[in-house]
Image (cartoon, helix red, strand yellow):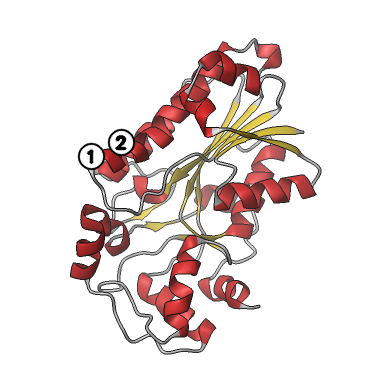
C-alpha cells in the first residue's frame, strides 16, 4: 500500500512512518510548502496513492499571540482544506481511497467526561481550532473512507512531554501542575501507531475515534506514576501563576482537562498495549 503523510517529520509522523515502512508500506512525505501552495501541484503529489494520513499542525502549547494563533489555526485548518480540495480535484480512479486525520481531545469541554457521542465542546480558541479542523475534511468524496483520531497527550521516549519532564523529575524537582485534579488523557506512541495501522488496513474503521488509553487519570496520578518510575520524590508543585506568566492564555491547556473514553476503539476490539500510566511510563523510562 502506498501512503502519503503530512507532518511526517514530527514525533508522531516519524514514529508512524518508521512503523509503516517496517510493515512493507511505501510512505511518502508531503512537504509543508505544498500544503500552502498550488492546488494542482498538491493534487499531482496525491495522485495514485492508496491512503493519505494528515498529521500537520504547529505546536499548540506556546504563548498565544495573534500571530501564533493564526499559525496554529492555519497549520491545521487551512492545510486540511487545501488537502481536501486537492483530493476532490483528482479523478475518482486516481484518488486515494482512505483519509486518516489527526484531531485532538481539546475539542471537548473541560471538567467533564466524554466519549465519541459527546457534543459538549470547548467554546474557546482550542475548541474552535479542533472543530474547524475536523469540519475541513467533511467535504471529502463519499467514496473516500474518512477516519479522524482525537488524540490525547502522546507519550514516548522521544516525546516532548517526556523530554521536558524527565530531567526535572530525575533532579527531584517534579510535581503536580496546579491542583493536580485536572484530567490527563494520554496515549502511548506505540498504541497510537497501532491504531493508525489498524485504521489503514481495517475498512470497518470510519468516522470519529478518541485515541487515548482506557484508564483515565488526573495530573496528580501522572505525577505519582512518573515519580515512581524515576525513583525520585515529586514534591514541588507547579503553581498556576507560574504557568500563566510563561504561557499566558495557553496555560489553561495544562491547568484544565477533560476525561475522555476510547469507547469506539474498545467496541471495535482494539487492544491497548499500555492501558495504564504505570505500564506506559515503565516502558518509556526504562533504558
Residue 274 percent across, percent down from the top left: 60, 66
- Determine which residue is flagged by label 1: 66
- Left or right: 146, with 131 as reference point: right
Picture quadrant of residue 49: top right
Q: Looking at this view, is 283 or 200 the one in front? A: 283
Is 116 situated above or below 90?
A: below
Q: Looking at this view, is 261 or 185 the one in front? A: 185
Q: Are marks 1 and 2 in contact (CB under 8 Å)?
A: yes
Task: Tell me if I can see residue 121 in this picture.
Answer: no
| Residue 70, label in figure | 2
Q: Looking at this view, is 44 or 213 the one in front? A: 44
Task: Tell me if I can see residue 113 in this picture.
Answer: yes
Instruction: Estimate how packed mark 2 is, as few (under 14), some (14 to 19) or many (20 or more) residues with alpha carbons within 10 Å.
Output: few
Quadrant position of the N terminus in the picture: top right
Instruction: Estimate how packed mark 1 is, as few (under 14), some (14 to 19) or many (20 or more) residues with alpha carbons within 10 Å.
Output: few
Is 94 situated above or below 159?
A: above
Q: Residue at x 61, y 36 (%)?
A: 5
Q: How many marks?
A: 2
Is 203 situated above or below 227?
A: above
SS at mark 2? Answer: helix
Quadrant position of the C terminus in the picture: bottom right
Residue 109 percent across, percent down from the top left: 29, 50
> Real-space Cα distance between discs 1 and 2?
6 Å
SS at mark 1? Answer: helix
Amino acid at each position: 500500500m502506498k501512503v502519503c503523510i503530512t507532518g511526517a517529520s514530527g514525533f508522531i509522523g516519524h514514529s508512524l512512518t518508521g512503523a509503516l515502512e517496517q510493515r512493507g508500506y511505501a510512505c511518502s512525505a508531503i512537504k509543508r510548502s505544498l500544503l500552502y501552495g498550488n492546488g494542482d501541484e498538491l493534487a499531482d503529489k496525491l495522485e495514485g496513492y492508496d491512503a493519505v494520513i494528515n498529521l500537520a499542525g504547529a505546536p499548540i502549547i506556546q504563548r498565544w499571540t495573534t500571530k501564533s494563533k493564526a499559525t496554529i489555526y492555519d497549520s491545521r485548518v487551512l492545510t486540511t482544506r487545501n488537502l481536501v480540495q486537492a483530493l476532490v480535484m483528482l479523478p475518482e480512479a486516481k484518488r486515494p481511497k482512505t483519509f486518516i486525520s489527526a484531531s485532538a481531545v481539546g475539542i471537548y469541554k473541560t471538567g467533564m467526561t466524554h466519549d465519541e457521542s459527546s457534543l459538549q465542546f470547548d467554546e474557546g480558541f482550542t475548541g474552535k481550532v479542533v472543530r474547524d479542523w475536523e469540519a475541513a475534511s467533511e467535504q471529502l468524496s463519499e467514496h473516500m473512507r474518512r477516519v479522524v483520531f482525537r488524540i490525547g497527550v502522546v507519550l514516548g521516549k522521544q516525546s516532548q512531554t517526556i523530554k521536558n519532564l524527565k530531567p526535572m523529575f530525575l533532579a527531584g524537582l517534579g510535581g503536580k501542575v496546579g491542583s493536580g485534579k485536572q484530567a490527563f488523557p494520554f496515549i502511548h506512541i506505540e498504541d497510537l501507531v497501532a491504531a493508525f495501522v489498524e485504521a489503514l488496513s481495517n475498512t470497518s474503521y470510519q468516522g470519529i475515534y478518541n485515541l487515548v488509553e482506557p484508564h483515565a487519570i488526573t495530573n496528580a496520578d501522572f505525577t505519582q506514576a512518573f515519580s515512581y518510575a524515576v525513583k525520585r520524590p515529586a514534591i514541588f508543585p507547579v503553581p498556576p501563576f507560574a504557568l500563566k506568566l510563561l504561557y499566558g492564555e495557553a496555560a489553561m491547556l495544562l491547568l484544565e482537562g477533560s476525561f475522555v473514553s476510547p469507547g469506539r476503539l474498545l467496541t471495535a476490539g482494539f487492544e491497548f498495549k499500555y492501558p495504564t500510566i504505570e505500564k506506559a511510563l515503565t516502558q518509556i523510562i526504562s533504558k
